[in-house]
Amino acid sequence: MGDNTVIPPAVGGDVIRTIQRASLAKTQVIALDIGGEAGPELLLAPGTALPVQPQQTVTPLAPASAPVTNVDTTVIAANAARKGLVVFNVGPVAVFFGMGVAAILNGGIALLPNGTWVMDPSTFYAGAIHAICSFGSTLAIQEYN
């Protein structure tokens, strides 16, 4: 027997999908479908609990700001304890980042004026972060350990 749960209900959001498959032995499968895209399936063996990823505790460091010019500079020091980072471009021009290497204009990660970069698992980096822009900007920085 399979059941689907739509999140949020009656709105047509994401779906938690369960399927009972009949093969040599009946198996239960669960998947999370996000935005209509079929998600990966997890086989549930009898008596096996669902894996749970505990939420990590983070501690915010003091808010910081960093000027950015047309010369490469390190704007965020390496931090092996870093668990998160949010950077907001307060200035009027795009800022470009280099991860552990010199930043170059029009290369790397670009942060447009009034743009926010939230470091996520696919872009997570604990090393030094460099920045450069065409003539002058300021970054607002919030780092978490």
Image (spheres, helix red, strand yellow):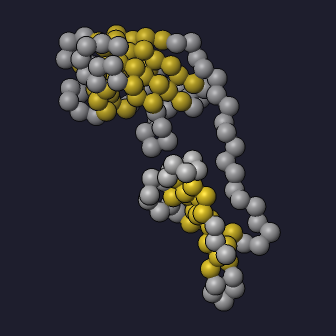
Residue 29 image-quadrant placement: bottom right
Residue at horizontal 25%, vertical 13%?
Answer: 92
Query: Taking 9 as reference, is 25 left or right?
Result: right
In this rendering, the answer to whether 124 lies above or below 141 is: below
Residue at left 69%, top 69%? 44
Locate residue 25 relative to residue 84 in the image: left or right: right
Q: Position of residue 5 (x, y in %)?
A: 61, 58
- Where is residue 60, by image quadrant? top right
| Residue occupying image coordinates x 67% and y 75% | 1
Q: Is residue 123 left or right of residue 137?
A: right
Give whichever of 93, 39 is nearer the camera: 39
Which quadrant of the rendered structure holds the C terminus? top right
- Residue 102 makes an appearance in the image: no
Q: Residue at x 69, y 51 (%)?
A: 52
Q: Farthest bottom residue?
A: 24
Residue 46 at x, y = what percent? 77, 73
Q: Position of residue 113 (x, y in %)?
A: 29, 19
As rendered, which of 10 and 45 lies closer to the eye?
10
Q: Is residue 30 visible?
A: yes
The location of residue 144, given as percent across then percent down, is 57, 24
Image height of 76 relative to 26, above or below: above
Camera-side residue of 52 and 28: 28
Looking at the image, is 78 positioned above or below residue 138?
A: below
Direction from residue 125 to residue 8 in the image, left or right: right
